[in-house]
Image: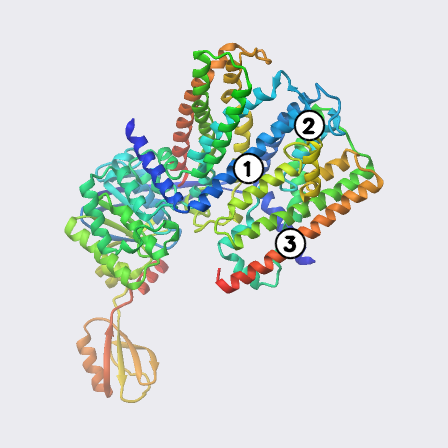
Amino acid sequence: MIEVEGLSKQFVVRRGRFRRERHIVEAVRDISFRVERGELLGYLGPNGAGKSTTIKMLTGILVPSAGRVQVAGLDPSRRRIELARKIGAMFGQRIQLWWDLPLIDSFELLRHIYRVPADRYRASLARFREVLELDPFLSTPVRQLSLGQRIRGELTAAMLHEPELLFLDEPTIGLDVVAKQRVRDFLVEINRENGVTVLLTTHDLGDIERLCSRLLVIDHGKLIWDGGIAELKERYGPERMLIVDLEEPAPPLQVEGARVEKVDGPRQWLRFQGPAAELTARVAATARLVDLQITEPDIEEIVRRIYQSS
Amino acid sequence: MRLDWEIARRGWRRYAAYPWATVAGVFTNTIFGFLQAYILLAVFRHRGDVGGYDARDTVTYVWLAQALIMTVYIFGWYEFALRIRDGSIATDLVRPLDPQRYWLAYDLGRAPYHLLFRGVPPFIVGALVFDLRYPSPLAAVAFLVSVTLAVVVSLGFRFLYNSAAFWLLDYRGIATVSVCIVVFFSGMTLPLTFFPGWLRTIANVLPFASILQSPVDIWLGKRHGLELAGTLALQVFWAVVLLGLGRLALRSGSRKLVVQGG
Amino acid sequence: MVEPVFLWRRLVGAQIRSQLQYRASFVLDVTGAFLISFIDFVAVLVIFHNVPQLGTWNVHEVALLYAVSSISFALTDLAIGHLDQFPQKVRDGNFDILLVRPRGTLYQVICSDFALRRLGKAAQGGLVLVYALASLHVDWTVGRAALLVVAVPAGTVIFASVWVVGACLAFWTTDGGEFTNAFTYGGTFLAQYPIDIYSAWLRRFLAYVVALAFVCYFPSLYVLGKPDPLGLPRLLDFASPLVALAAALAAGMIWRGAVRHYRSAGG
């Protein structure tokens, strides 16, 4: 679906007033990856890392400085309009709807822009109305919508024409937990049932945990991770946490294979690697336990470690 | 006082930061200067005098108007209204800095930049091509004082129509009407001396003549002695009135904000 | 050919429906625009209050000039007045999405808004036109009538072309991708670039210089049967439709070039 090879992009930035000095900024440096049809992957990176620039090159907004890009078999910068029929994009912080018109009018206009046949449009719209609960504000002018409502409208706008490939930039931003869940479920559904490929750029790690099986991480223009989440956790966050509640407060437990990280009254946090069963037995032998929990590494922490290590 | 100076500097810098905009503006002003000059000069092919102005006065008027157009900011200014609309006004009101005073200081920092860099170049072009009238030293000084007052009067009025944003969702309607009135009754479209008697009377009663016509008349030497003092006094009068009305608007507008939450 | 118009008509229909919902405010708006635009004409009347003629033109003839350019300008404003906000739109990053849609960007930008309230200014121009034609004794021929009828749409296209070219400057306001501000959600005036100030000036420039040249001057000369005071070739009288065509083509090409620059220099 997507093939990227040696992709690079440089910008010439001019600073200063009259005679402006030129700096060359390398936004994206020699990136290569492949995305197969039907994947749902996340694209992560700190701000300014080159995420947006990459997406823009994949969608045809920007022309690369070097390298090869193929999206759905087309060169985005050369065959923009052809490609546009097959893809959908939604940039969470930007507006693509008609500001002064009722939401439904935006959909109608987009329908004509994409030339969607009437029956397909109706079916598609009906589905979105149900999943994203659009009915209460379908006739409201976009400028009067709350952020959450507008985001739902923008999502619909991006997908009305049933694209094969979706680029979503911060799609759940501003949504409440319930709405976020619905959107995530919906993305999973269209991905699994309709085979829509989804490239998700996000800072919301909840999205990543729940949706993505594969992650691309970019920093300073270079791709520093391309792989599954499980491997990511293994590589950067193989340690888990055993939280024990003792009968009464005690000094930090000395147990082989674990390191006490925090003590708060009768509760202690132990960091460990590997299987939990043995360790639990050893801890139980050392102290009187009331309760215990095991937590997985926080993906936020993992991501932070990646950013820091690069 | 120190704060006012800092704010004024910010006003200066905000426009000084875009030298190319200034260049573009100078170019436009120069072109309009020529257009207006030729149109009005055509009038003088039939008459020697219009309302006390001769051809030389009128051409000088045209180039002064072009020079002052940005200095006294005749056209639409919405910075304050936008702050009201996007809610920043709420934080502004909490700070110990009065918004009207802020914008006044800001404008007084901006105006010199526009006078020097937007005003002087087109005027020089006009002076080279046409035969203009120049002021006596006293008139020149009075002119500068008058321009400063004109800026204040203009700011007073602009602040007022910006305040409409406290009450109206779409303040642009009022703003546009206000700007049109200023453009017409300040003498920007045509020197007020061209107006028929009854229209001239209306113009004299309104504050807008103080924004452009007054300083220009002073430069042209049309006001002497008592009349000169009177013109300046009238400008001061309008400045006080407009700023006063602005304060009322600010007070009632901020009260509305507090009650309704913006 | 029909299809692009179809989309635009849908937009216009939607805008009309939406704006008529606030009928009172809308009527006020239109009336306001109508009255305000009279101020321009009042300036003309004031000049003629002082002299019987400007050069070889009397007040009714100037009124004709004024009317043709005024109506054309108003119609352009009606259709693409929103181009004034285009630089801000580009800076906010709201232009990019247009490149992800299967249509030309200029077409989409034109179809993004429609300002019904400018009808007021067009109506005012219409009234002045009626006044001018009623007061003048025109020696009507088919040619003259045809040219007058064509003058307004041609004028609209000419204005629109210059306006579009002016808007192209917006593509040079970003210094390079994500490395300058683009994310000002809600837009802040204080970060405004010079282009916005410039584009406001451009409008006035259009209204006078371009208008004087092709939109109204030459067609009026022909309709009035006047010898050209400037002594330019008579063929120019018929130039406006051709100039309109050339201007539209040029504008389209320049726009395309500007977008190409935007796509390589940094969206």
Give the CA separation, mark 1 to mark 3. Answer: 24 Å
In the rendering, at what x and y percent does residue B91 appear?
53, 61
Whether residue C155 is situated above or below residue B188 in the rendered picture: above
| Image mark 2: chain | B
Task: Please give the label number shown on residue B245.
Answer: 3
Q: Are marks 1 and 3 on the same chain?
A: no
Q: Indicate the position of residue B42 as horizontal and vertical percent values.
A: 67, 21
Is residue C223 positioned above or below C49 on the image? above
B55 on left or right of C230? right
- Read off the chain for label 3: B
- The residue under the point 81% across, 41% down is B227
Q: Secondary structure at mark 3?
A: helix
- Figure quadrant of residue B132: top right
Q: Which residue is mark 1?
A: C36
Q: Between disc 3 and disc 2, whose residue precedes?
A: 2
> Does the image show residue A84?
no
Residue ID for mark 2? B126
- Residue C162 in the image: state x and y as whole percent: 47, 28
Position of B11 with respect to A115 (left or right) is right
Residue sitting nearer the eye, C197 or A137: A137
Mark-to-mark CA distance, 1 and 2: 30 Å
